[in-house]
Image (cartoon, helix red, strand yellow):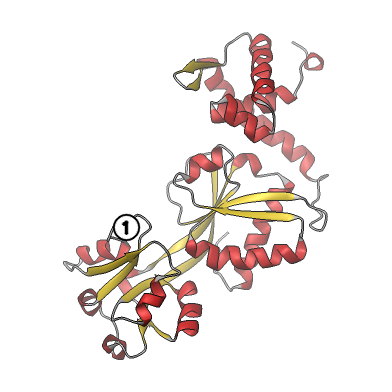
């Protein structure tokens, strides 16, 4: 086999097929029709002399040869991208691109909101689509989102992760709440009635696990699906809301609430950014990640990259 007789674009198609194990998903990722993608798979099978992917129910599964090709092909395409990246500079003013970013209410308020303002000014042709992901690694791997921003643990090897900043928990109470007069110990905190942001409606969170470790229990009197509603319920009740500090401060100022330090054992979390390694060298994706880093720097975030 000679390279002159091989359509190297087929390798891009093969990579997408091996990653998604689906003609439909690979076609969507590559902006091709399913029939064109299926035809490319047929040509690859002839070239390689192996089925590469075979049907198992509704999915395609790789043959042993396909399994061996997957990591080799990923490294090869990354090397090819690296060869070209210096010649491909991004002009934000002329960039026309849509990016899908998976995050939570917190990520939208703290990161995506200022990111959107900056991009609107610097790159008016760039669109940002926010979404909620129930399986971030799969959505990034299969091209349903370009970037994830959130609390991310145990990512698979093909997902790149970068720490953005450390966040801590605080408590929001109404101004004349009796508990606002003294420091919140863990025992005093447990004795209060709580409101919890829980999109699934389950009245348990990080605080409950910490309390149980100390032999304590709290009453979660209300759950809501969004941080938009929760602080307003705090304003007119004796509830306390445990919330990330960067979100709490502006809300307290707007609604006339008190911000108190949460008991020390509650700690906080690390906000992270995640993307697929196939976009590591892509100039537009690198530019987007740089804009996120710039937003974090402007807010005084503790970057650890």
Quadrant occupied by the C terminus? bottom right
Q: Is residue 71 visible?
A: no
Residue at 69 percent across and 54 percent down: it is: 127
Position of residue 25 measured from the top left corner of the image (x, y, whole percent)? 58, 31
Q: Which residue is mark 1?
A: 201
Pick the front one: 258 or 70: 258
Image quarter for residue 43? top right
Q: Is residue 272 visible?
A: yes
Residue under the image location 25 percent in, 68 percent down: 220
In the picture, measured across the screen, residue 11 lies left or right of residue 175, that is right
Compare residues 156 and 203 and report the one nearer the observer.
203
Q: Is residue 31 left or right of residue 110?
A: right
Residue 150 point in image, percent of width and height: 49, 57
Q: Residue 2, how many percent across, how many down?
A: 78, 13
The image position of residue 70, as x and y in percent, is 57, 26
Q: Is residue 169 left or right of residue 7?
A: left
From this view, report whether residue 126 is shown above or below residue 230: above
Quarter of the figure that contains the N terminus: top right
The quarter of the picture where residue 68 lies is: top right
> Measuring 48% from the left and 48% from the top, which residue is drawn there?
133
Q: How many marks?
A: 1
Binning the other alpha carbons within 10 Å of mark 1 as few (below 14), some (14 to 19) or many (20 upward) gives: few
């Amino acid at each position: 086999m000679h390279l002159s007789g091989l359509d190297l674009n087929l390798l891009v198609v093969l990579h997408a097929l091996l990653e998604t194990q689906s003609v439909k998903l690979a076609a969507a990722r590559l902006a091709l029709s399913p029939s064109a993608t299926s035809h490319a798979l047929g040509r690859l099978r002839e070239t390689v002399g192996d089925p590469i992917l075979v049907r198992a129910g509704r999915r395609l599964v790789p043959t042993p040869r396909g399994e061996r090709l997957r990591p080799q092909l990923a490294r090869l395409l990354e090397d090819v991208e690296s060869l070209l990246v210096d010649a491909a500079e991004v002009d934000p003013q002329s960039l026309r691109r849509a990016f899908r970013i998976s995050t939570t209410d917190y990520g939208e308020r703290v990161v995506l909101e200022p990111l959107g303002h900056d991009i609107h000014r610097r790159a008016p042709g760039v669109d940002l689509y926010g979404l909620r992901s129930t399986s971030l690694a799969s959505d990034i791997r299969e091209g349903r989102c370009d970037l994830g921003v959130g609390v991310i643990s145990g990512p698979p090897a093909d997902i790149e992760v970068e720490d953005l900043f450390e966040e801590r928990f605080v408590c929001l109470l109404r101004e004349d709440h009796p508990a606002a007069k003294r420091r919140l110990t863990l025992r005093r905190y447990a004795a209060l009635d709580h409101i919890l942001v829980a999109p699934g409606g389950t009245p348990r969170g990080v605080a409950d696990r910490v309390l149980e470790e100390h032999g304590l229990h709290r009453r979660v009197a209300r759950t809501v699906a969004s941080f938009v509603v929760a602080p307003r319920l705090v304003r007119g009740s004796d509830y306390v809301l445990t919330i990330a500090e960067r979100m709490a401060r502006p809300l307290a100022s707007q609604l006339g609430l008190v911000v108190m330090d949460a008991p020390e054992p509650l700690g906080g979390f690390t906000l992270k950014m995640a993307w697929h390694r196939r976009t590591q060298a892509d100039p537009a994706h690198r530019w987007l990640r740089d804009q996120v880093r710039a937003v974090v720097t402007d807010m005084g975030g503790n970057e650890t990259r």
